[in-house]
Image (spheres, rainbow, N blue to C red):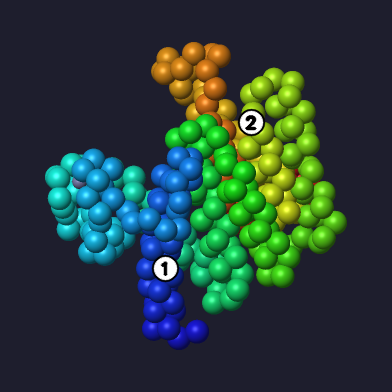
Amino acid sequence: MLFAARIALCAFAAVVGACVFSFGNVLVYRVPRGMDFVRGRSACPSCGHDLAARDLVPVFSWLALHGRCRYCGAPIAARYTVVELVGAVCGVVSVAVWGAAPQAAVGFAFLFMLTVIALIDADTQTIPNGTVVAVAVVGLAGLAWPLADATLVDRAIGVVAVSVPLFILAVATGGFGGGDVKLMAAVGLMLGWRLTVLAFFLGVVAGGVYAVWLLARKRVKRTDAIAFGPFLCGGTAIAVLCGEPLIAGYLSLFGLA
Ligand SMILES: [Zn+2]
C-alpha cells in the first residue's frame, strides 16, 4: 500500500476509534445504571445541562474546555478523554495488525468490548450479561473473519477450557465472579483454547502482582475482593494482538519449540 494511503487509513482508524470509544464511555456510565444507552442526550453529570455536539468531540472538546464543563465549570474526569485516546490507539493497532480487512473491524470490536467490560467491572465489580453477549456475538463474527488460527474444535474446547475450572474455583472459593466465568467462555469462542489459556495466565499473573502490591501498601485487607475482570480483559487483549509470538517464545525458553 502507498505510504500516503497508509497514513490516511491510520488517521481514519484513529478518528473512528476515538468516536466509538467515546460511545464506550456512554455505555460504561449508563449500562450499570440501567439507563437507555441508544437514545437520550448526554448531559453534564454536575449541572445536568444537555451537551451540544461541540461539547462531545472526542479529545478535542476536553482540551478546548481545559477539562471543565462549558456551562457550570465543574471538572470533567480525565478518564473519558484517556478512554477516547485508547480508542484511537486501538483503531490504529487494529488496521496495523489485521490490515484493511473485515478482521480489523472484528478485532476492533473485540478490543472495544474488552475495554467497556474492564471499566464497568473496575467501577462496579460486576460484568453485565449484555456485555458478555456482545463479546459472544463478536466471537461469532470471528468464525467468518477469524482473529486466531483456531479450528471449530479448538473454539469449542476454548469455550470450556478456562470457564469450567474458573466456575469450580468460583463456587469453591468465591474469589471469582460469575461474570468472569461467562467472559472467559465468550473469549474461548473467539480465540480457541490456546490463546484463551494464555489470556487467563496473563490475567492471573497481572492480577496477582497488583493484589500483592495493594497488600504491601496496606491499601486492602487480605479478605477484600478486587475486580478481576480488568486483568482478564488486559490479558485477552495481549493474547489476541501478540499471543502466538508470546507462546512460541515461552515454549522456546524450555526448549520445546
Ligand atoms: Zn456542568
- Where is residue 226 drawn, in percent x and y? 52, 26
Give the residue at the far right of this rendering: 153
Disc 2 packing (10 Å; few <14; some 14–19; many ≥20) = some
The residue depicted at 70 percent of the width and 62 percent of the height is 140
SS category of the residue bearing label 1: helix
Residue 218: quarter of image:
top left
SS category of the residue bearing label 2: loop
Q: Is residue 101 visible?
A: yes
- The kind of residue tagged 2 is Gly
Residue 225: quarter of image:
top right
Q: Residue 177: which numbered mark, if any? A: 2
The residue depicted at 28 percent of the width and 50 percent of the height is 43
| Sooner in the amino-acid sequence: mark 2 or mark 1 | 1
In the image: residue 32, left or right of residue 68: right
- Where is residue 87 drawn, in percent x and y? 42, 58
Q: Is residue 180 above or below residue 40?
A: above
Please state which of residues 137 and 30 is positioned toward the viewer in this rendering: 30
Please state which of residues 214 and 113 is positioned toward the viewer in this rendering: 113
Q: Is residue 6 above or below residue 37?
A: below
Disc 1 packing (10 Å; few <14; some 14–19; many ≥20) = some
Q: Is residue 126 above or below residue 51?
A: above
- Where is residue 90 drawn, in percent x and y? 47, 60
In the image: residue 178, left or right of residue 131: right
Q: Which residue is mark 1?
A: 16
- For the residues labelled 2 and 1, the Cα–Cα distance comes to 33 Å
The residue depicted at 38 percent of the width and 73 percent of the height is 11
Do callouts 2 and 1 mark residues in contact (Cβ within 8 Å)?
Answer: no
The residue depicted at 72 percent of the width and 45 percent of the height is 185
- The kind of residue tagged 1 is Val
Q: Is residue 243 visible?
A: no
